[in-house]
Image (spheres, rainbow, N blue to C red):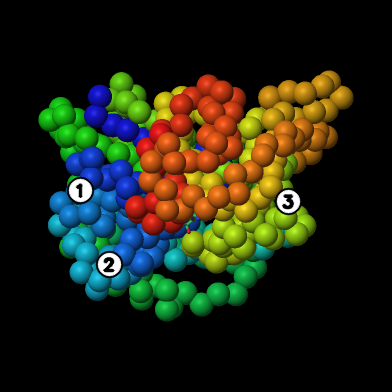
Amino acid sequence: MAVDILLGLQWGDEGKGKIVDVFTPQYDIVARFQGGPNAGHTIVFNDQKSVLHLIPSGIFHPNITCLIGNGVVIDPITLRKEIEELEKTGIEVRSNLIISDRAHLILPTHKLLDRASEEAKGDQKIGSTLRGIGPTYMDKTGRNGLRIGDILSGDFLMKYQLLKEKHTHILHKLYDVDYDLNLDEDAFLAAIEFIRSLQIKNTESFLYQKIRENKKILAEGAQGTLLDIEFGSYPYVTSSNTTASGACMGLGIPPSSVNRVYGIFKAYCTRVGSGPFPTELTGEMGENLRQAGGEFGATTGRPRRCGWLDLPLLHFATRLNSITDLIMTKADVLSDLESIQVCTAYTSGEGPTMEIPYDLEKSSFSPMYKSLPGWNTDITQMSQSMELPENLKSYVYYLEQALHTPMSFLSVGPDRDQIIEM
Ligand code: GDP
Ligand code: IMO
Ligand code: MG
């Protein structure tokens, strides 16, 4: 069984980029399976911080194949920019990067449609990153989309014009918006030329072959389980399957090839964009967490909403993804607190439950909290589990019991080196 999956258990930004970068040396291939440039995955080493949106987080290690799978939606402008910026810093990208010919293309008009749709929703808006994700997946499932493979055919421009006209019609008739497409369209067409020169492949066949050769593959999730189109806090979700089964679909690999499923979460909770957040801290405590954790979006710079860890939601996510190993990040951010609150259940008229209500937003329930003692120790320089303060070990043990899953790693800071194997 050659494939391991690493995915987020909350609303994204759990630290996936950092952990994928740490794990990469044990793998031959790192593959993104869904989402697109709405993702922002941060990697820190040698005092340098990099944020990746489309390229898998294995790219900083030499001789590792980084693969963008069929389930990903690609903005050619972002991809080109990302490759050129990495190459400027001396990172070898082109010989290590493979792109699925089935991955769908984000057109400039998809981004305009995203914005128009959000504006039309008023105070019901999703809080989208406005990267064109929703409209592109809509065209994919509506069977109108353009794929990377199309850019290799002679009639690409004609296909592009047809889809663009469909979009501009919707923009005029449905949304009645003004826009100027020219600049973006020039950059788009230039980026398409650039992408033609990259390694575009039937990646499901490539991966099939690599699995047969017993090569090791790490599937890198984007967003998080609570943003999944099926199981997230709908409609405040993204438009792809962020869960473990999404890795099979988004790479064309059989479920039987999957070995470990790493579920990553923060020691507290954050959310960027709209939607329900039962344990949200809106006052001073929330602001303190935001500042201490540097909780500002890696893609849009928006402040992230912060709150306590929510065990009913984490339990749901662990179960849904069949997580074999937990990874907790950012425990260092809580180091100054005397005590830490954890939501252990929801309560409504019928007493405490771990079940998630159908509509988190409209159901009337309250989170029930347990207070655990803080550890009041700087853990950022620790590298062995036995060095950890007792109260943090107890916190970890408590979570392992509640989630029926072992904790394999603890991240104690943003840097590649700040990691403890448990
Ligand atoms: P991703 O989208 O899941 O890859 O996560 P982001 O990169 O959007 O956000 C995670 C943020 O937390 C980034 O700024 C990381 O550098 C940082 N980070 C990751 N792990 C840790 C950790 O254990 N402690 C601290 N303090 N920061 C971390
Ligand atoms: P990474 O991979 C956090 C959120 C947006 C919005 C909703 C829908 O860095 O964890 P979309 O642009 O997909 O239409 O937005 O999903 N969102 C994320 N939040 N991390 C992400 O990615 C996200 N990608 C999308 O804020 O609420
Ligand atoms: Mg992120």
Task: Specify which label sits upstream in the sequence, 2 or 3.
Answer: 2
Q: How crowded is mark 1: few (under 14 residues within 10 Å), some or many (20 or more)?
A: many
Camera-near label (3 vs 1) is 3
The N terminus, quarter of image: top left
Q: Alpha carbon of mark 2 to alpha carbon of mark 3: how far?
A: 37 Å
Q: Where is residue 75 in the image (x, y as percent from the top left)?
A: 38, 60
Nearer the observer, 230 or 84: 84
Q: Where is residue 210 in the image (x, y as percent from the top left)?
A: 16, 34
Name the side, left or right, on which 72 lies relative to 203. Answer: right
Mark 3 residue type: Leu
Q: Alpha carbon of mark 1 to alpha carbon of mark 2: how far?
A: 15 Å
Q: Where is residue 192 in the image (x, y as percent from the top left)?
A: 28, 65
Quadrant of residue 76 in the image?
bottom left
State the residue position of label 2: 86
State the residue position of label 1: 65
Answer yes or no: is residue 202 visible.
no
Label 2 CB less than 8 angstroms from ligand 1: no
Label 3 CB less than 8 angstroms from ligand 1: no
Task: Specify which label sits upstream in the sequence, 1 or 2.
Answer: 1
Q: Position of residue 46 (x, y in %)?
A: 31, 64
Mark 1 residue type: Thr
Q: Residue at x 53, y 22 (%)?
A: 404
